[in-house]
Image: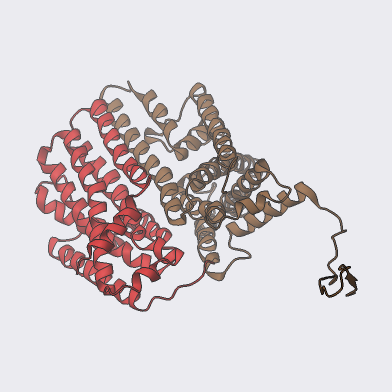
Chain colours: A brown, B red
Amino acid sequence: MAVEYPTATQSGDQTRIHNIGYRSYDGPRLGRSYATRSLYSQSLRGAYGLGRSVKSKVLPMLLFVVMCVPAAIMVAVAVATKAKDLPVDYTRYAIIMQAVISLYVASQAPQSVSRDLRFKTVPLYFSRPIETADYVRAKFAALASALFILTAAPLLVLYVGALLAKLDFADQTKGFAQGLVSVALLSLLFAGLGLVIASVTPRRGFGIAAVIAVLTISYGAVSTLQAIADAQSLGDGGGSSGAIAWIGLFSPVTLIDGVQSAFLGASSAFPGGVGPSSGEGALYVLVTLGLIAASYGLLMRRYRKVGL
Amino acid sequence: MYDPTVARLTYRALLGRRRALILGALPMLLIAVSVVVRGLAGADDQTASDLLGGLALATMVPIIGVIAGTGAIGPEIDDGSVVYLLSKPVKRSTIIFTKLIVAIAVTMVFSALPTFIAGFILNGNGQQIAVAYTVAALVASIAYAALFLLLGTVSRHAVVFGLVYALVWEALFGSLVSGARTLSVQQWALAVAQKVAGGEMVTSDVTLPTATVLLALVTVLATWYAGQKLRSLTLAGEE
């Protein structure tokens, strides 16, 4: 291949251009949607540590197992005791395990975006055909899917177990479907919040702590306030039961709890067991969807200009 | 044992730029919640005790402790800049001790001080509740800072493991398995608070002598072992 072209016309000049066989790419160009899909699947695999080191597989896999084991135990108990119903509703399961879900979001959201920021790989992504919206959508969808896998797997365990235990098919299917809708909403909401917080800081440790603080402390504050409002309304004859529902709007977990107890037939985990009425429930749905949309918008704004 | 330059650098790493604001948001939330509760429920000793015990001591102190304790050394090890610090003629144990002092100070300022203010807002220090929980937060700050500083030198996922300990072990297992409560910084701190309050408002599952011994033991051992880890630190690449 190495053909030499003499370029110098003057005698005595030894300058040459050597053709050492570089060839231009003439295969198919896979384009923007392919790149977005690749980014999505890479991020989704990365959220469970697949394709990364053994050490980074430990935590997501551990949390996944911790999510599923109680469901398996419940099924085993239900089958052994020939119970008529599962010990826990499908919709209630994610609320009970919210600490594990929060930990998962907190550990994987910074993993997904903070490292790109810290090692300044984001400008490299944007040098490919993908655009800001593609990057944000791929990351958002990947984390939401990872969360959905985490939260829907135990529900599937419960459902299969319930069918094996020959519980009522129609009843269980309805509960399972309601549970799936609820965890899908929860996945979108948590993924959005987690990514927005994590994309602000390039430092992974700080991102983890910030996500946990937002998810856990808001839940702690809200449930404390609700408990106090509940105790007060017992004192004056149910006067401020509306306050419980209003306070519940201020933390992601109680938000999901409110939505599912208003529309998805769940029994509320609020103190006193009184969920929001359907009017307040509509507000819950609006706030939830609004938060998801707002976190998407904030992410778009965050990545409009990155690096450089 | 205390190196002012290392201390200054650590303070800047913890509180520099906008981090002090983010760290300050949690105490602000606690104080805001206390104001709302005072307005909603009036001054009530049981409510004050529940709020300070549930929100301040059980959630806020550990989270601030995790941020300050691991933040004092974790990022430096993470990005490898700790080698410049280690190559200076400063003893490793001095570095750890200085960072511990800074982490304790930050945790105390951002958790014990707001606990005190929140306690006064909630019931004006009735039955010594505000003081008792402030003492508990101060004691817990020391133990948490030492524990999480050690985690920061041991693992790259220190923040996650710290949070797992604080939220899953202390909160979840602590409420289900009574044996887990013996091995929880929160309960040790509560034992000290119980002594201060003297009433039935603040209770702990651990006796005071056990708690003090365990607190001192954990703090000293964690600091010593962190110093040992720093002596033979291997820098790994990003996974």
Q: Where is residue B121 in the image (x, y as percent from the top left)?
A: 19, 33
Left-right relation of B204 to B64 = left
Left-right relation of B148 to A86 = left
Quadrant of the image occupied by residue B116: top left
Left-right relation of A215 to B144 = right
Q: Which residue is drawn at 22% across and 54% down?
A: B105
**Quadrant location, the N terminus of chain B:** bottom left
Q: Residue at x 90, y 73 (%)?
A: A3
**Quadrant location, the C terminus of chain B:** bottom right
Nearer-the-camera pick, A264 or B137: B137
Left-right relation of B192 to A66 = left
Q: Position of residue A118 (x, y in %)?
A: 52, 56
Q: Which residue is drawn at 12% across and 64% down?
A: B209
Q: Position of residue B133 (x, y in %)?
A: 18, 47
Instruction: Tell me: residue A81, above or below residue A85.
Output: below
Quadrant of the image occupied by residue A225: top left
